[in-house]
Image (cartoon, grey):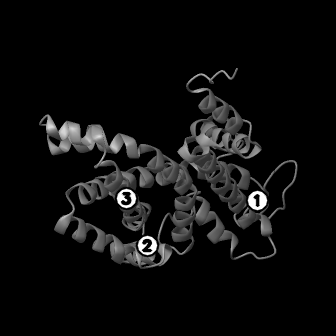
Amino acid sequence: MNVAAPVGTGRVKRFAATLRRPSLAFAAVVIVFWLLVLLTVQWWAPYDPFEEVGRRLQPPSGTYWFGTDELGRDLFTRVMYGARESLPIAAAVIVVAVTIGTVMGAVAGYFGGWVDSIVMRLADVLMAFPALLLAMVVSVGLGPGPRNAAIAVVVVWWPGYARLVRGQVLTIRTREHVEAAITIGAGRSRVIGKHVLPMAFTPIMVNATSDIGQVVIVMSSLSFLGLGTAPPVPEWGALITSGSKFFFQWWIAGAPGLAILTVVVGFNFLGDGLRDLFDRRSADR
């Protein structure tokens, strides 16, 4: 006699299997590490990030783990402090882009008609350009600086979320619980906020998690091109800019490049893990 499995058993097993994945464990370690660095570096960093501590262009050693730069500053300290510059900006860009994209996509998908056409054509125009190229153009128009670079990346990033949310809303708005809410007289804003958007939260969260690493790359690229954070601020892209002038002193650009790599891989693995965890299709396998 077959006994039916308790409700939710498959979901629990899938959750446990996802947590056991090496990629997700690596992502957790990397993200927790950089969060701890971000919050505590000022208390344990060996040197001041702007202080000249030794001879210039020294290779990595037991004294200077990542070597020294062209001014004799400790690169390990500067890379660790770079997390305070790069990660909060990337997180803020994602939050703003997700907010704008969610609102625009929800309005377009729910109301349809000319509202949908205007929002989606605007999104199409912005998405027609390569992300970095459009961010460069907007940054040049606004002027160099980290705030303007962040605004430029938000302009580039929100259309993707608008398209994602619009597609979700078009599917969800025809479901019975939404129609029931409309029938009992719920206002449009309440229907969207209480009955539609919560069901679109999972794909938004998954994409936002994966996009943090991509935003770090774009922000660092703008700094590398002189449109974002400028030296001597220890931002990862600015550090790579300094290292590009010293080809044979590979550690100057290599250390911040390695930091960017770990962040990108970590958040990509986390996004993949969350996608597998919340993917409804995998629940039936």
- C-alpha gap between disc 1 and disc 3: 50 Å
Characterize the local packing of mark 2: few (<14), some (14-19) or many (20 or more) Cα atoms within 10 angstroms. many
Instruction: State the image coordinates of residue 137 (x, y, percent, origin top left).
Output: 40, 78
Q: As shown in the figure, which amino acid type bears the numbered disc 2?
A: Ala
Residue of label 2? 135
Report the mark closest to the observer, 2 or 3: 3
Q: To which quarter of the image does residue 190 belong?
A: top left
Q: As shown in the figure, which amino acid type bears the numbered disc 3?
A: Gly
Tell me what residue is drawn at x 63 percent, y 37 percent: 36
Left or right of residue 76: residue 111: left
Q: Quadrant of the C terminus?
A: top right
* Residue 54 visible in rendering: yes
Q: To which quarter of the image does residue 153 belong?
A: bottom left
Label 3 residue SS: helix
Instruction: State the image coordinates of residue 148 (x, y, percent, origin top left).
Output: 38, 65
- C-alpha gap between disc 2 and disc 3: 25 Å
Q: As shown in the figure, which amino acid type bears the numbered disc 1?
A: Thr
Residue of label 3? 167
Is 203 drawn above or below residue 55 in the view shown?
above
Tell me what residue is drawn at x 51 percent, y 73 percent: 226
